[in-house]
Image (cartoon, coloured by chain):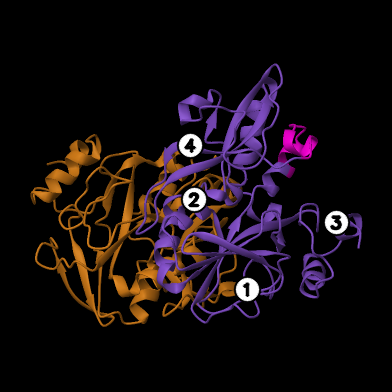
Chain colours: A purple, B orange
Amino acid sequence: MKLSELAKMHPKKVRELIRKGEVDLPTSGMSEGYLQANLAILPKKYAYDFLLFAQRNPKPCPILEVLDEGSPITKIMADGADIRTDIPRYRIYKDGEYVKEVKDLKDLWRDDFVTFVIGCSFSFEKAMLEADVPVRHIEDEHNVPMYITNIATLPAGIFHGNTVVSMRPIPYKDIVRATTVTARFPATHGAPIHIGDPSIIGIKDIDKPDFGEKSIIKEGEVPVFWACGVTPQAVAMASKPEIMITHAPGHMLILDKKDAYVSVF
Amino acid sequence: MKLSELAKMHPKKVRELIRKGEVDLPTSGMSEGYLQANLAILPKKYAYDFLLFAQRNPKPCPILEVLDEGSPITKIMADGADIRTDIPRYRIYKDGEYVKEVKDLKDLWRDDFVTFVIGCSFSFEKAMLEADVPVRHIEDEHNVPMYITNIATLPAGIFHGNTVVSMRPIPYKDIVRATTVTARFPATHGAPIHIGDPSIIGIKDIDKPDFGEKSIIKEGEVPVFWACGVTPQAVAMASKPEIMITHAPGHMLILDKKDAYVSVF
């Protein structure tokens, strides 16, 4: 199956191919125009603190849907996506440590699991590209650079820690447009949280990201920082929950709602 | 103390007067330009379901702040407001039944109480008035008419029920403006959820609201409906929690953040 075919396919059909094991790739570019989402699965005993953390920190942790306890089936953002099988790859963490990557959760599913479907930056990057704002890590085909900042999240129960940001180098002439087009999508991290001097948010060396790969900042470009979906994962992991399951990086849940569905203006 | 004096006073000062018992009035018009909020206090055992209900139904239930279990002190939307004393009047409900109105919660406070601070429509009504959109129940000095619709909320745990709406009659020429100015404030119910024919959302007689008082709809005006903060209260009450405490109608919590702070554009 070619990516060009998957790009034109409805999310329901792509999820079906993923479920059958016929598609096992990063999902970027599939079902063009549709939302993709991060996944965090936690036992119910952590769910209130995690939901409260998200309520208090909507920019790094924009919740699109929370599934009922024990249910692996989406109702709101996708019609009947099965969380156990409809994502190409998952990562299992135990007591805050990475254990392994798996292709489905059929044998791991528990009746006390609560699934959080969380907005991802793919949507606002497309909005940037459509507005002719360059996105360096897409141009250069590498993973977006991410940094742990000195910006504390608002803690909730057992969850606390600093905000993780993603960085995109933006030409001066495009900074305002990059801000306004991404502000339309609070459900996928929204407007930047910092523009310019990285040291102000505690980043010592812009060429040494904490996650992902460095982006080249050209003459006349300014680093612009957005709250990143790695924040809730990092924060949750730091509190060492007995088990936590996420999507594998880049292997997202593809939803039935289009990007425009969550645009606020 | 005259309302005209309270109108110009900072929220911190007004809350202090309320705390001392020197102000015991509906808060409409006090601390002009600042947000006011609905209050819902529930024991922790109901808190996850209530927070999830709010996440799934943000239009009737826009959460501005959730206080930590047992804490009566706000941190985010107001600097140190004391939930036990800084609201003029409270209502106590037990097993879903109204019990009494009280002036403070000093003797009633419990270590397992979780306080939800919820956006209220005062903010968007001011935005309407500033945009020259008439607000009939303010003109005619009566309580806004509210109706139970046939629009089901998305249930969460023990909480389920239909959406309650408030209605404002709007002249044809102002309908679009009424929609766009209120859409700026999703944290205070946002854009309307229905415009026109009341029967479509299950309202049999527009002159017989389920709560509040009827508004006169003049020739050339259309009834416009917004999701109402009574929804979460009605839904919570229907599930008969052992105890639930709310503000008394019109007696709101005045916050330190201005309306513009929660505007999305």
What is the chain identity of the residue bearing mark 4?
A
Query: Which of the two residues, A218 or B188, is positioned nearer the viewer here?
Result: A218
From the viewer's perspective, is B72 left or right of A83?
A: left
Measure the C-alpha gap from mark 4 to mark 3.
35 Å
| Residue designated by label 1 | A75
The spot of residue A191 in percent (x, y) is 57, 39
Residue A58 image label? 2
Which mark is first along the chain, 3 or 1?
3
| Residue denoted by label 4 | A149
* Position of residue B120 in the picture relative to residue B21 (left or right): right
Instruction: Based on the picture, tell me whether residue A228 belongs to the magenta stretch.
Output: no
Q: Residues within 10 Å of mark 2 (few under 14, many from 20)?
A: some
Q: Are marks 1 and 3 on the same chain?
A: yes
Question: Pointer 2 and pointer 3: residues touching (CB < 8 Å)?
Answer: no
Task: Name the N-terminal-most of marks 2 and 3.
Answer: 3
Is residue B141 in sight in this rendering? no
View extreme (top): residue: A219
Residue bounds of the magenta highlight:
A126-141
Examine the rendered structure and indicate whether residue B189 appears above or below residue A149: below
Between the C-alphas of marks 4 and 1, the distance is 35 Å
Tell me how far mark 1 sits from mark 2, CA to CA: 21 Å
> Which numbered disc, 4 or 3, marks the residue that appears first in the sequence?
3
Q: Say yes or no: labels 4 and 2 on the same chain.
A: yes
